[in-house]
Structure formats: structure tokens, C-alpha cells
Image (cartoon, rainbow, N blue to C red):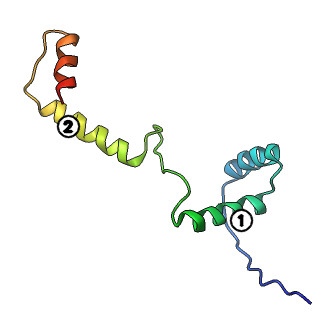
Amino acid sequence: MITKNNEQIQIRIDTKTKREAKKILDSLGIDMSSAIKLFFRQIINARNLPFELRGENGLTLRNAELLRESTLSAQNSTKTFDSGAALLIDALKD
């Protein structure tokens, strides 16, 4: 006789998130339990989260930091340009 060593996980999630995820999973033909098992397998395979984390603006966390740094650099710059073309020429030098 084969015995399975299964563990149980309980999570709490808001109704809207559960409903929206279930709708998508149903359209894919996957139940929630199977989706979570797939997610865990991908964590193991990647030895990390199997996706890039993104903020509300859609940027990855690293790209958001680069944008913040670039914005601060531009604000602190003393460079001025007479035209958009001059700005592009300067930008392409780097």
C-alpha cells in the first residue's frame, strides 16, 4: 500500500483577489489547489520567486529605483539644452 505524506496549508485572502484569481484559473482549467502546487514547484525550480516583482506603475523594483536616481540626477544637473535634438545628441554620447 502506497501512503502519501501530504501537508495542508491554510491562507487568508481577500474575497476580491480570490474571486478574480479563480475566474482566471477556471478559464485555464486549473483549480486553486493545483495552481498553488504549480507555484510552489516553480519556486523550487527557480530557487527564487518565479517572476519579477513589479510596483503599481508596472516597473520592476530595480527599474523604479533607476528612474528615481535618473530623476534626481536630472533635477540636480546644470545642463541646459536649446532644443530636443541637442538633448538627444548629448544623451547618445553616453
How far is the residue under mark 1 from the one under mark 2? 43 Å
Q: Amino acid at mark 1?
A: Lys
Q: Position of residue 24 (x, y in %)?
A: 75, 44
Q: Position of residue 61 (x, y in %)?
A: 40, 48
Which residue is painted at 72% across and 45% down in the image? 20
The extreme front residue here reads 93
**57 sits to left or right of 43:** left
Q: Which residue is mark 1?
A: 37
Q: Which residue is mark 2?
A: 72
Which residue is painted at 48% across and 38% down in the image? 58
The extreme left residue here reads 78
The residue closer to the viewer here, 42 or 69, is 42
Q: Amino acid at mark 2?
A: Leu
**7 sits to left or right of 85:** right
Closer to viewer: mark 1 or mark 2: 1
Which residue is painted at 74% across and 76% down in the image? 8
Q: Position of residue 83 (x, y in %)?
A: 18, 9
Give above or below for 9 relative to 29. below
- Name the secondary structure under disc 2: helix
- Name the secondary structure under disc 1: helix
Asked if the residues shown at circle 1 and circle 2 are in contact, with their CB atoms under 8 angstroms apart, the answer is: no
Where on the picture, by quarter, is residue 82? top left
Where on the picture, by quarter, is residue 77? top left
